[in-house]
Amino acid sequence: MHATSQLALGAAAVGLAGTWAWRQRLALRPVHRASAIALALFLAAHLLGHLAGLAGAAAHQSVLEALRLIYRQPLVEGVLLGCLLFQMGSGLTLLWRGRGRRRGGVAWMQAISGGYLALFLLIHVTAVLAGRFQGVDTNLQFAAAGMHTPPWQWFFGPYYFFAVFALGTHVGCALYWNLPEPLRARALVGAMLAGWLLAVCLVVLLAGGFHVLEIPARYLAPPAGLAGRG
């Protein structure tokens, strides 16, 4: 089967599963949670793969190539893409449904972090797919290009920082609602601190604070200034 067909098949399978869940009137929140658990494995590997750049660009590239043997299988990639689209759509739906009924700081942190993640993923996935369509390797240099193209670093620094911090916060909020009382606050604070630390490391890494990054000229062209992590 052609790679594009496999990707489309994977995305269609997720779409059909989502349609079935809707027609069965399944509660959206549990399905959203189940999709999040599946995506968490990919996002953890994806983020840690980028943080392998702390050992240098070559180390990052080696880890990235190993991970791509799994998640760039067209069928796997199609399922991941479908899950991402479902996660964004279901998350925004839950965000809208909760308007006017949201009470407490944790509920608002969950809503704000989820809304930001949806916006980030929309920009990020679009940028990565556009880069790949143009034949660009969406590696560490691709991710860092905006940080080395003045004045775009003032956009991309907060853009990356808040994405990772929002991920930690959102995971922490989910743990808060699903753990017993003695563990709730600790899990939330721990997840937020981990998100903050990873966010700082990623931004400093992309800015060249740990190692000098040689950014190819083709990544520094104006269109590359809107690129996201690959």
Image: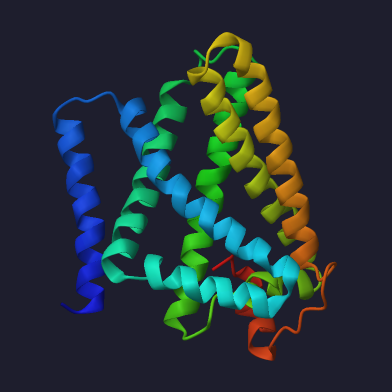
Tell me: residue 84, above or below residue 128.
Answer: above
Of residues 230 and 175, the one drawn nearer to the viewer in this rendering = 175
Of residues 221 and 1, the one drawn nearer to the viewer in this rendering = 1
Tell me: residue 80, above or below residue 139.
Answer: above
Whether residue 76 is visible: yes
Of residues 100 and 161, the one drawn nearer to the viewer in this rendering = 161
Image location of residue 39, percent across then percent down: 42, 47
Q: How many marks?
A: 0
Please name the colour scheme applied to the rendered image: rainbow
Tell me: residue 70, above or below residue 107.
Answer: below
Image location of residue 212, percent across then percent down: 82, 78
The residue at the point 62 percent across, 69 percent down is 226
Q: Quadrant of the C terminus?
A: bottom right
Q: Name the outermost residue toward the bottom.
A: 217
The residue at the point 47 percent across, 84 percent down is 134
The residue at the point 29 percent across, 70 percent down is 74
Q: In which quadrant of the rendered view does residue 51 lie?
A: bottom right
Please indicate whether residue 218 sits to the left or right of residue 38 in the image.
right
Of residues 139 and 149, the one drawn nearer to the viewer in this rendering = 139
Q: Name the outermost residue toward the right.
A: 209
Whether residue 154 is visible: no
Tell me: residue 76, above or below residue 39.
Answer: below
Image location of residue 168, percent across then percent down: 62, 39
Q: Quadrant of the N terminus?
A: bottom left
